[in-house]
Amino acid sequence: MSRFWSPIVHSLTPYVPGEQPKLANLIKLNTNESPYGPSPAALAAIRAAADDTLRLYPDPGSDRLRAAIAQAHEVEMEQVFIGNGSDEVLAHTFQALLQHDAPLLTPDITYSFYPVYCGLYGIAHEPVPLDEAMRVDVDAYRRPCGGIVLPNPNAPTGIALGLHEIATLLRAHPERVVVIDEAYVDFGADTAIGLVRQYPNLLVVRTLSKSHGLAGLRVGYAIGQPDLIEALNRVKDSFNSYPLDRLAQAGAEAAIADREWLARTTGKIIETRSGLVSSLKNLGFEVLPSQANFVFARHPDRDAAALAAALRERSIIVRHFRTPRIAEWLRITVGTDEDCRSLADALKAILNRNAD
């Protein structure tokens, strides 16, 4: 601690990102990155943009990218907000739309950045427990609140809500913003973007980090009715008018346009996920029904932290959370078929060794 810190710094508990280890021959299944990388069209666009124009500031409104996103989702440009990764989009959302007297509702087991934002912006926060099956219980959100934030599919469970359940939430809280964080929606869940026209209190947040394989580019966006987007722009332009550089805008625009690449790579991941689930169940694991690019699994007879450590000794990294209710679970990113076979072989060896 330092005497120079402001009071808020003393009270913050920062988010801890997934480890980015520098190990040789690593099978990295801990941060839900794509195993296939971005569209070749995105890479070509980034290379083409790396020219003398980098001496100029980027377009502060990311107009070409917003137009591409609007076209892809059949909305208007005025309904699209762009940010430096969905984390920045969410940060602006918390400040612009969720900072009210009543508590913000989120699942008790969910993306751990949400309570961090609450601490940063002084927002009262009320976790709503998942049910015994680790699912979001929509009826439990029928209480006074300052807003609701839900990932769909949820992280780290991978379980998704149906659109009828999201619509139920929106109707139950017409005077509060409901944020649906769709970081993983392209891996089997239904997007709520189609509900935006009907529900003025809905904001959908998306990222190019997962399904588009662009985690290193840092591009996120939100879709909602124009008054919600205006609030986000007011915060952005009071913080940083140029959140996306020229390379990011060019690469993201090309990635959004390459729908064939998106469909092919997400299809591969969904197929591999099915095989991974079967392998884990054959080894005695309980696996939650995932519609994300990861699975959440536990073994009834093995300590999750010990399993994660044993995998690490074999240069395989998975995510273990030392938090209540999920300390015996592992979150495993869906890698390539070869990655997942290596994981299953390693787990089989570890379980057999421990059984001796």
Image: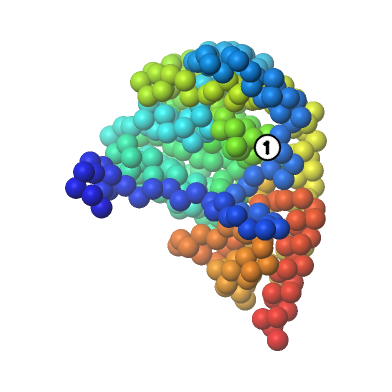
Task: Judge whether 235 appears above or below 2 on screen.
Answer: above
- The answer to which of 89 and 124 lies nearer the viewer is 89
Is residue 41 among the parts visible in the rendering?
A: yes
Q: Residue at x 59, y 69 (%)?
A: 309
Name the colouring of the figure. rainbow
In the rendered structure, the answer to whether residue 45 lies left or right of residue 21 reads right
Q: Alpha-carbon neighbours of circle 1 within 10 Å: few (<14), some, or many (≥20)?
A: many
In the rendered structure, the answer to whether residue 115 lies left or right of residue 282 reads left
Q: Residue at x 51, y 64 (%)?
A: 327
Task: Judge whether 32 appears above or below 339 on screen.
Answer: above
Tag 1 residue? 213
Locate residue 299, reporting x and y percent.
64, 69
Q: Residue at x 51, y 29 (%)?
A: 84
- The answer to which of 327 and 334 lies nearer the viewer is 334
Tally of numbered tags: 1
The answer to which image quadrant residue 5 occupies is top left
The answer to which image quadrant residue 240 occupies is top left
Locate residue 340, reporting x and y percent.
75, 57
Locate residue 194, reporting x and y percent.
62, 24
Task: Judge whether 314 appears above or below 124 on screen.
Answer: below
In the rendered structure, the answer to whether residue 246 lies left or right of residue 14 reads right
Image quadrant where one finds the C terminus: bottom right
Q: Amino acid at mark 1?
A: Gly
Name, please, the residue furthest toward the bottom: 356
